[in-house]
Amino acid sequence: MNKRQFLAVAATSSAALPISALAKKSNASPTLLTITGAITNTNRGAIDPALDQMMVKQKLQFSKAYAFDFAALSALASTTIKPTLEYDGKPHALKGPFLIEVLKSIGAEINKQTKFALRAVDGYAAIVTLEDLQKYRFIIATHLDERPMPLGGLGPLWAVYDADQYPEMAAKPVNERFGSCPWALYHIDVLNA
């Protein structure tokens, strides 16, 4: 599949399907987000050393996972936030489901000590506590200014929050507000102590 076909497939949505129906369609389009760790529901097996090259190079290991494609993420209830972004100093509309709701939809085993490793395609990883995930109301942005985010920009997924809405974040220079928000998100590991 070439890049144009990938983006065309990613832009299609099956918004009315329940998550159980989407799991059956998991191979309908490319996986954009893999969630591992303390989860109950899975739709893929262990890491494959031959086919999961980026994950292997980033030293990920798992025996089970849940793989989301664009349609499955788009099918979840979404919200829009409008943070000022460091890249141009302007507010932009970012739309997507709340990260905590994505995790709940697959039966993530969450308690007060749970942490989440949010990993980008370049290997950047941020560890976020449950408290911060809830306090800042992280979303998994799929759209920027009403368009699906392309690979090679900030997307196709971005774990992000509206930093402008929290005084302790808004007080920071804009380039210091999003350290726990990896763009080009592709993996979340649910970590229970």
Image: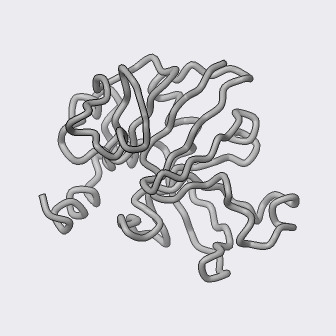
Q: Looking at the image, which residue sits at the far left? A: 1
Query: Would residue 126 be found to the left or right of residue 32 on screen?
Result: right
Residue 138 on image: x %, y %: 63, 48
Q: Position of residue 71 (x, y in %)?
A: 31, 47
The image's colouring method is one colour
**Image: 51 above or below 71:** above
Q: Residue at x 61, y 55 (%)?
A: 181
Residue drawn at x 42%, y 54% as measured from the top left:
121
Q: Quadrant of the C terminus?
A: top right
Q: Give the residue at x 39% y 49%.
A: 74
Displayed quadrant of residue 69: top left
- Residue sitting at 80 percent across and 73 percent down? 173
Vertical side of 116 occupied by 82: above or below: below
Relative side of 158 to 127, left or right: left
Residue closer to the observer: 120 or 135: 120
Is residue 86 placed above or below 47 in the rendered structure?
A: below
Left or right of 182 on screen, residue 58 = left
For the image, the number of numbered tags is 0
Relative depth, front residue between 78 and 89 = 89
Quarter holding residue 134:
top right
Q: Toward which corner of the image does residue 31 lie, by quadrant?
A: top left
- Residue 104 screen position, x and y as percent: 53, 28
Q: Is residue 144 above or below residue 127?
A: below
State which quarter of the image contains the N terminus: bottom left
Q: Position of residue 18 (x, y in %)?
A: 34, 32
